Image (spheres, rainbow, N blue to C red):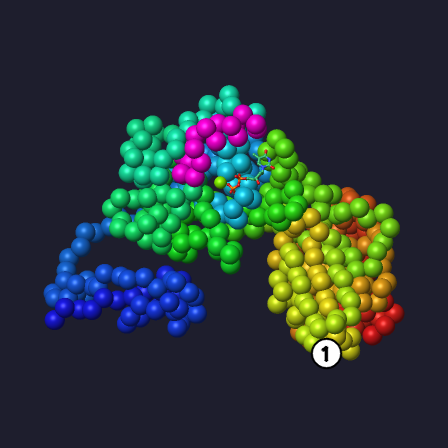
Amino acid sequence: MAKSLTFTCTACGAAHQKWAGRCDACGAWNTIVEEAPLSAGPAAKSLGASRGRAIALGDLATTEAPPPRSSSGLGELDRVLGGGLVPASAILVGGDPGIGKSTLLLQAAAAFASSGLSCVYVSGEEASAQVRMRAQRLGLAQAPVKLATETNLRDILTTLEAEKPDLAIIDSVQTMWADNVDSAPGSVSQVRACAHELTTFAKRKGTAVILVGHVTKEGQIAGPRVVEHMVDTVLYFEGERGHQFRILRAVKNRFGPADEIGVFEMTGQGLGEVPNPSALFLSDRDTPVPGSAVFAGIEGTRPVLTEVQALVAPSPLGTPRRTVVGLDSGRLSTILAVLEARCGIPFAGLDVFLNVAGGMRVTEPAADLAVASALLSAREDTPLPADCVVFGEISLSGALRAVGQSENRLKEAQKLGFSTAIAPTSTKLAGDVSGMKVLRMPDLTTFVGDIFGAG
Ligand code: TYD
Ligand code: MG
């Protein structure tokens, strides 16, 4: 009897009897794909029954040197890659359309090429003339980068096979088309097949491959999540359209720390590096204003200070607005609920707007106390002291929890001219950070009473 087809969700792996638009198991949309059935008969019996080839087993210890890394000369890019480009690695760079992925990678290609690597840049989205014009505008026209515009993957692989470059950039994986897969470019199976072919090529030939991937409205790299599993490194290029700052964030890195960020500034001459992001994210702060708190955060291995801004105003609406930019909106709801339940400070009937200045995105729980400070400061119309930074996680009980790398946070704050920090009582410091006064708070109620004289 012929076995019926099986359908599998590419997001959670659940098996389904028939195709559906939404996976019952994980709730994801458009993730169910058809899989070839396991063949019936003797071959489908347990694999242990047939004899396989013995695999040589090795030790963990190695005498081999770690892979040599190539530096691009763009310090912020090298930092996000974990200290430079690793040969034979596959890297996915995702981001919104128009955020600057092609600009960044053209600059990266030129930088790597100028440092002695052979680079091929394949564009499936723009004509060669367009890429050349951009290179000219960026002052990179003389860089020894080899350029092609092509979308046929077979031709691209044949070319790369002959060329054997150190680095190949594919812009973008959604435009590529493998002729052995019977669906349109950009579809799940095409993107998966192309990413698979290109990552396999990277491992086989020792060429580092950078794939550009588009991001869907929900912020995920379009196509199956499986592309993210296939590659060694996943970088997101993010930023607010209205701001000139762009952040390259490592969300996965097999060759270095994840969560590392590189900060760039979009100018008329392309992307410039921003080696000291704290100074940049703190907007003009001469006079203290209500609703602003400086958060001493950690991004990857580097401390970064950012300004959290809040505005609280009476709401004309039945359900007051909660607008958040640069932070998780769920986190805001939690903090508002804790303020109400544990400190008796209601926000019902008030619109709340929360924003991280400069287009930065903060994901650390350590930002909780800074968010609460900005909210309270806006609500009470009382500015926080001008020379003060804030960090700490708020638990649902209203207690403040210590966060990691406190000393690095304090040192960065001190470097930028701050002299006071508000932190949880349990914050551990190996020694004093000279010139920084630490106000230790056990819980949110004490914090509200001490800083705002209410509670
Ligand atoms: P692009 O690299 O084409 O974005 P993506 O590949 O992510 O879609 O970036 C295009 C944007 O960058 C465009 O809106 C113009 C802007 N830009 C500058 O501001 N300055 C520059 O020097 C360049 C090349 C682009
Ligand atoms: Mg592009």
Identify the residue at image location x=32%, y=39%. 152
Q: Nearer the viewer, residue 81 or 149?
A: 149
| Quadrant of the drawing holding the N terminus | bottom left
Quadrant in the picture for residue 263: top right
Q: Is residue 59 visible?
A: no
Residue 364, image x, y percentages = 63, 58
Residue at the spot 24% in from the left edge and 46% down from the top edge:
180
Residue at 77% of width from left, 43% of height from top? 415
Q: Is mark 1 within 8 Å of ligand 1?
A: no
Nearest the eye: 342 or 270: 270
Residue drawn 40% across the image and 51% down it:
227
In the image, the segment drawn in magenta is 118-138
> Is residue 438 left or right of 336 when viewed as pictured?
right
Q: Quadrant of ligand 1?
A: top right
Residue that label 1 marks: 341
- Residue 281: give x, y in percent of width and height: 71, 47
438 in relation to 160, above or below = below
Name above or below for residue 268 compared with residue 385.
above
